[in-house]
Amino acid sequence: MKVKMLSRNPDNYVRETKLDLQRVPRNYDPTLHPFEVPREYVRALNATKLERVFAKPFLASLDGHRDGVNCLAKHPKSLGTVLSGACDGEVRIWNLTKRNCIRTIQAHEGFVRGICTRFCGSSFFTVGDDKTVKQWKMEGPGIGEEEEPLHTILGKTVYTGIDHHWKEGIFATCGQQVDIWDEQKTSPICSMTWGYDSISSVKFNPIETFLLGSCASDRNIVLYDMRQATPLKKVILDMRTNTICWNPMEAFIFTAANEDYNLYTFDMRALDTPVMVHMDHVSAVLDVDYSPTGKEFVSASFDKSIRIFPVDKSRSREVYHTKRMQHVICVKWTSDSKYIMCGSDEMNIRLWKANASEKLGVLTSREKAAKDYNEKLKEKFRYHPHIKRIARHRHLPKPIYSQIQEQRVMKEARRRKEVNRLKHSKPGSVPMVSEKKKHVVAVVK
Amino acid sequence: MAQDLQALDSHRKEFKNESWWEIRAAKSLLALREQEEPEDLPNDYPSSTSEDEGEGGGEQKHQKLLEAISCLDGKNRRKLAERSEATLKVSEFTVSSKGSGERLVLSDLLESVKTSSSLATVKKQLHRVKSKKTVELPLNKEEVERVHREMAFNKTSQTLSKWDPIVQKNQQAEQLVFPLVKELSAFAPIEHVLNGWKAKTPLEQEIFNLLCKNKQPVTDPLLTPVGKASLKAMSLEVAKMRRAELQRARALQSYYEARARRERKIKSKKYHGVLKKGKAKKALKEFEKLWKTSPAVALEELEELEKARMMERMSLKHQNSGKWAKSKAIMAKYDLEARQAMQDQLARNKELTQKVQVASKSEEEEGGEEEEGNLLDSDAVNEAHMTADGPNPWMVRNHSDDTKEAEIQKDSEQLPEPMANEASESEEEERPVAEEEILLKEFKERQLLRKKSGLNQDTKPVGRQETKDSSTQEVLSELRALSQKLKKDNHQCRKQNMGSVRTVQREGPAGEEEEFLLLQRLEGAQTLEELKELSKGCFQNEELPRPALEGQQLERNNQPSAPKKKTKEQMIDLQNILTTKSPSVKSLAVPTIKELEDEQEREQKQMIKEAFAGDDVIRDFLKEKRETVEASKPKDMDLTLPGWGEWGGGGLKPSAKKRRRFLIKAPEGPPRKDKNLPNVIISEKQNIHAAAHQVRVLPYPFTHHRQFERTIQTPIGATWNTQRASQKLTTPKVVTKPGHIIKPIKAEDVGYRSSSRSDLSVMQRNPKRLSIHHKKQLKKT
């Protein structure tokens, strides 16, 4: 007679080491696990709530400057090093891990208008109101040595911005015209103009490195080709653009921070319509910087807040502010895409988390799995009213809040008027202009 | 002018009579004069000029006329009128001063000798000039710059559009892991790694020493020093030869391999069979040879065979317990081939397990023969269960039963009753083990007989009731006898049941037939249900009138027979089945296991009943339902106001008439959905609280609500998915590694060729413009 016995493979239930998780055999029969949607919904709701609970983005404030911080620069090779230039001509180098200043240089008289690091991280350049371009060594001087720049170039006019080439020893300055300099030479190897106006910033394209973008105070954004030594195209917007930033993953995309409270993302091949208009700020946008992943960017505004926008969304996903933070002049996203730094009027540099509720440090695999699951749940149920409401809720300072309300009223009024005009005029006589096209005045070839 | 006119007039007078052509000439002259008029205007001759002047003038005129005439001939060539001036020189020979400036040059005379080819060259030149377009005005500086810019822009946008596919790919990617380029961990050669290494522990040192002694490679694993040395020592020819040898060996090997593969792939059974037989024959021959030449070795081989036999006996290889054998066993009933295959296998088993010793006992052989006989006789199905030791006694019994049944069937059809009885009795004696079954068979037999008689009776036109009665009487008597036998056997194990039944027995009036009934049930009713039925029957018996009771009894009597029919249907003819009245009720002889199960069930039911003795769930539910129905009904409105039109106050109620008058009856709502479903409450109220959690508008990327619902309905958690699946479902879109610098995307990373020339070199090659503006600035300063 055959006797049937229960026999199991010990591999299925014996752990290899004591540290392994106990293997729990599970029955995935759906009838045993009913109500999957309501249960996941509740989980998503909890995840969203917890995200808001843990949203503590502010990490540190680096104080030491004796005037407003005017410009910031990242170190290309070291995540923990940041450079900042102040309105009194002082340049400081910070160590982010220790959150202290490691070096102070009195670089210029007057403002430090621009600062940039060399692609290899060995030196950095500053421009100031004293019409000079200075190159500095990244390492501090030895004991007894004086703090001196490697090179100093005396210019004819004030330089308002500087940016370094991403691969070669070339840098570009802007002021009355865009100058391209060889590091070895004291005069520019090429200079490009288009009209006569002061150019506020110039940026090299990080991917196609011969491309440059600049914005001038006569409301236009000009693109240049360094190889052909010619400007390419100019787009004139409603108001002045303060800075632009190129997307580090998409060669032809750049975002412009505008005075009219908006940011415009352009495809440089089609400048007549921006790809996306990002609006949420309630005052002029002063600076913008892309996340190194190219999926998001951060913008600093005169309304004392910084906002994080997804590239493909017109509304911001996050707003950071503190009581003490004044007009934010410059902002940078660190190159590991985890942190954001902003320098503001009241002499501080602030360090924020890019993901407000993210847990810092090493995660165990279970934590990671839980995090992923929660993220996915939030994404899955993001259209549900309760979850949407909780996820969107942010506390805002009163001035910003009331400004937003005001803006909303104004916008609604404008819209209504437009609609009425459309309604009461001969069909076809009043054209419908989309929001994207509204802000572009002209494209000059 | 007047003079001219006069002269003309005089001419006219002179040549009045001239021929007609002269008139024409004059006409032409007129025209000529008219042409000359404006030119002559400035020559103001004094009107007082004398006649000789007029004479001279007349000569001039004549000359002109001549000229005009000459002009007229043929080609109508006309010299342009020359301006004549008043000259101071007046020639004596009345030669006019006209043409005085002209001088005949020799070259002029010669010209006429030449051909007029010079004109062609001019023509050519003209053509050349005409074909060359005139150079347009240069564009102004701004325009030029604009053109430059446009060109440059087109070029740049072209170079940029190579990024389109990559951007698109990255946007659609399920997951992007940053940094995009993984830093490859460099593989250093072992020598470099081992450079700083030294053997420290004694074991390591020992191994190291050994390696050194044998000249094994410590660092370079490819060639030992010996190998290297041998390589060096080998001459070219030897090396070549060796290589050729190796090649040949390789080729041979591959050839054999291919052949073996081919042979293995042949599917023909015949081929393999022949092959096997051939091998076996060969082996046999060899063995015989061996036996003759060296019996010791042969014995050894025999021993080996014995060993193989032992192995075979131990193993289950040809035991009909494998998958194949089982499947064949199922097929064996229908398929002759399968049966054959089974038999073959068994035979093989036998063959393998048979002792090879020549000195085998006759008895054993006989036994073997017997077995073989059996095997040949019996069904393949039974064979399947046989072991080498002999057929399973249980199976044997079954088998024999079957055969007997067949016999009985034949008997019942052909032989009279006593004969069959005798046969069965004899069998009973032979096999006391299967007593019960045989008893049952007996009973069956009789029943069959009875049915036959019944059939016979049916054909007769006699009153049916009587015949039935008689037949039942017969059956009853038989049954009684049988049951007594059975009772003896099962007496002890069913004491309990008996007791319970006995009580019933005591209560009910015991008629002859009822008594039998009880007896029969005593044996047959083994389950609780049956007992219940039984007791019911007893109680009914008290009340029911006789005829009804009889009918019942009849049915009951037929009860036990039915299941047996079921089990041995092959015995029964179609007609028999048709004649039976109640086709299926529970059997008398239910297997004991089932009995036990039923008991367990009963116990469980009892326990549940005890546990939930207090609460009547059903009643509660009904009550709840009633309440919900009431609550959901629309309410009547009572609008009576106490004190209006009558006295009001404490303890006073508005009058019934008034209440009736002011009562507004609510209209009856639609029927409830659960009106006809007694076990369900369907709430018809929509849940307002749930609505707050629901999505009201279809979100943007979705085009149909079903699409959206589907995304919501598929769970992603580990509760509903396997670990791997849930991991896959919850992969984040963007993964960044902490502490890694993410650099901008590069052309080389995505497989594009980055421009070989650096931007700087390109710029230096065409330093075409330091812009004019800037140059100016430089000059200024």
Image (spheres, rainbow, N blue to C red):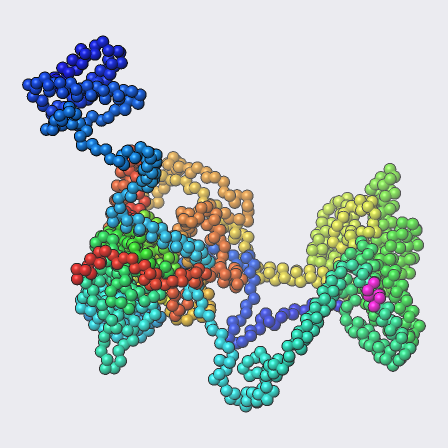
Q: Position of residue A95 (x, y in %)?
A: 30, 73
Q: Position of residue A337 (x, y in %)?
A: 36, 65
Which residue appears at 31% of the width and 21% of the height?
B74
Residue A441 within the segment the image draws in magenta: no
Q: Is residue B413 left or right of residue A12?
A: right
Q: Which residues are magenta?
A: B274-279
Viewer-proximal residue among B401 and B458: B401
Where, by quadrant of the figure, is residue B169 drawn? bottom left
Viewer-proximal residue among B133 and B598: B133
Instruction: Tell me, yes or no, if residue B453 can be seen here.
Output: yes
Which residue appears at 39% of the width and 51% of the height?
B692
Q: Position of residue A299 (x, y in %)?
A: 29, 59
Q: Residue furthest left?
A: B48
Q: Up-down: is B367 above or below A382?
A: below
Viewer-proximal residue among A45 and B19: B19
Which residue appears at 19% of the width and 63% of the height?
A156
Q: Is residue B763 left or right of residue B564?
A: left
Residue B278 within the segment the image draws in magenta: yes
